[in-house]
Image (tube, rainbow, N blue to C red):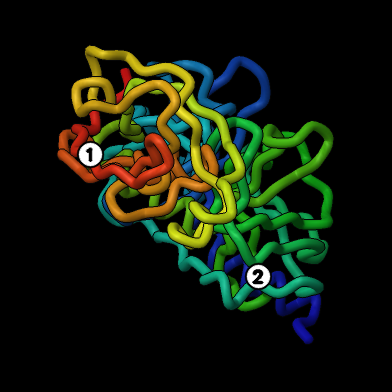
Amino acid sequence: MTTQNGFADIIKSVGESIVRVEGRRRQPASGIVVEAEGIIVTCDHVVRRDEGVRVGLADGITLDAHLVGRDPSTDLAVLRIAATDLKPATWATKDAVDVGAYALALGRPNRFVQASLGIVSAKSVTPFQVPGGGKFEYFLRPDLVMYPGFSGGALMLSDGEFAGVNTSAMMQGEALTIPSETVLEVVKLLVRDGQIKRGFLGISAQVVRLSEANAQASQQETGLLIISVDPAVGAGKGGMFQGDVMLKLDGQPTRSMEELRDVLMGNRIGQVVEVVVIRGGEQVTLSVEISERE
């Protein structure tokens, strides 16, 4: 078991990866160094302005920061500062995080790094849909005190690896940790594109249960009933009609709105993909172009 001095030694080692983020009028928050060349990740809710953001480093230096991009749906934002020799965090994988394991929340709301000790109290094995509309690779909840200014800081495991980014804004009265896999994916997309691109078909839909025959034929119990179609956007141009039941998009099942949103993320924008629908009791395959949601 890690001793008290052991925790202190580990924090001294990884503390340089925790920075202060001055992006709101009230108390500063925290952030984590992702890349030595000045890439910082923090929580979106603590960056209340696009300009005039500053980042405080472990050595006391404070630098102006450029907002690379933000994703409110996962409460993450990426900043860039003019630095080339920062100490990037080491991130834990999903398999390294266990319920009951010791964990520390690390933050730097002022000049010095601060810590709060607790345990990992909950972890799911499946993706978790968050209230803001985004999705975490899995649900991760720490049982510890999140002091003011800790949002944007790290959940550190006993070996010094970071399990994710702590936030107090996702669920009222409850701290959550945005898992490392989600953090790194969002950072990659924001650095590349400046935003999280989401595809758009121009439809509204709701989940419906399939008939026994259609369920057996499609090997899924539910699909998406198309309630309305915009004729000027991809689905309408591709021949999708009100009353169709969508089964698959680009080969991926669309058994729920969450699954549809997952398929529409990022790299399919601008592509023409196959859509399988039930129409008149028969499966029909259409070709539709995925537009970018404005």
> Could you say whether the residue bearing mark 2 is in a helix, strand or loop?
strand
Looking at the rendered image, the quarter that the N terminus falls into is: bottom right
Label of residue 107 in the image: none
| Image coordinates for residue 164, horizontal then vertical, percent | 57, 56
Image vertical order of residue 100 relative to residue 213, above or below: below
**Real-space Cα separation, disc 2 to disc 1, in angstroms:** 48 Å
Residue closer to the observer: 243 or 24: 243
Say which quadrant the C terminus sits in: top left
* Residue for badge 1: 286
Contact check, label 2 and label 1, Cβ < 8 Å:
no
Quarter location, residue 146: top right
Q: Earlier in the sequence, mark 2 or mark 1?
A: 2
Q: As rendered, which of 163 and 130 lies closer to the eye?
A: 130
Asked if residue 236 is positioned above or below residue 222 in the image, the reply reads above
Residue type (three-letter) at the residue carrying disc 1: Leu
Residue shown at 41%/31% (left/top)?
A: 244
Considering the numbered disc 1 on the image, is that residue within a helix, a strand or a loop? strand
166 sits left or right of 148 in the view: left
Q: Is residue 40 visible?
A: no
Amino acid type for the residue under numbered disc 2: Leu
The residue pinned by badge 2 equals 157
- The residue at 44%/57% (across/down) is 218
What x and y, as percent, mark residue 192?
A: 23, 42
Question: Visible in this render: residue 194?
Answer: yes
